[in-house]
Amino acid sequence: MLDQAQRLRQMAASNKLDEKKSCPKIITVTSGKGGVGKSNFVVNLGLTLQKNDKKVLIFDADVGMGNDDVLLGVLPKYNVFDVIFNDKDIKDVIVTGQYGIKLLPGGSGMTRINEITNVQRNKFLEKLSALENLDYILMDTGAGINRSVLGFIACCDELIILTTPEPTSLMDAYSLIKAVVHFKIKSKAKVVINRTLDKSEGQETYEKFKNAVKTFLKIDVEYIGSVSEDKKLVQAVRSQKPFVISSPNCEAAEDIIKIANKLQGIESKGTSVQGLFKKIFNIFS
């Protein structure tokens, strides 16, 4: 189903960095199916990292279905392809949310990636220099197994698979990891269990998932936490105010803090913003 598996493998293995430039850690967050709370997780994780004095950019890479702007309560006027096709400046497209977090909307324009000329590509990469002062880029992908999702996985430094304890969600997450292994895109992934009734359910769900992965797939998985089911989440979405801001002491917010702290403790080289989009262009064009 993926006609450019070789290119994905090459790009996943390629990590040539410009040492003179800031290299933020690029984390792709994805899921095997929709409706598991992925975008809500990304937004609240990003805000938590931002509150921890980290400079964070969320790249809403969910083709045509992105809603990170809604969750952040902001109204983007443009998206990334206005920079490419309409010669907008990058600062006109970036939206700033609470605590100074940045959002780069992908928009439905992601479907036009094959139309980009070499001149447009190079000009866009030059404009990205204004975004180099970052610690993290969180890429919020669409759900499911398709070329777009696998491509964004290949571009990242760290991969987080979000699932819930529901059997269908776990099966879809397993299928996604199976595709990642099949195309040799990544050799490891981190797992977060969302919407758990308690901590024990999160750990037990992960253990079952890990056993299946270890038995049948050659990939290292790591559990970095769970996020509790909390009515504060529903209220936050409806009010367009992330729960780490509206209810910072709720159980779900505390769970996100623990996950953010674990991620901050991970030491590995990042990728420059230009390097990220070079990979994206090479994979999708």
Image (tube, rainbow, N blue to C red):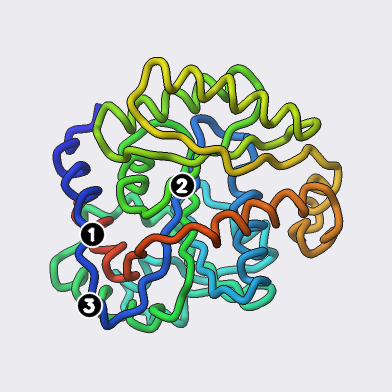
Please name the residue that numbered disc 3 is placed on. Answer: 123
At horizontal 31% and vertical 80% (from top left) the residue drawn is 21
Mark found first going from the N terminus, 3 or 1: 1
Residue 219: x, y in percent?
Answer: 36, 31
Amino acid at the residue labelled 1: Asn
Please name the residue that numbered disc 1 is placed on. Answer: 15
Q: Nearer the viewer, residue 115 or 163?
A: 163
Residue 2 location, quadrant: top left
Residue 94: x, y in percent?
Answer: 49, 75
| Element on which disc 2 rests | strand
Which part of the image, by quadrant, shows the N terminus? top left
Label 3 CA crowd tier, 10 Å (few <14, some 14–19, many 20+): some
At horizontal 70% and vertical 57% (from top left) the residue drawn is 257
Q: In the displayed structure, would residue 277 be above or below residue 131? A: above
Amino acid at the residue labelled 2: Thr
| Element on which disc 3 rests | helix
| Element on which disc 1 rests | loop
Please name the residue that numbered disc 2 is placed on. Answer: 141
**How many numbered markers are drawn?**
3
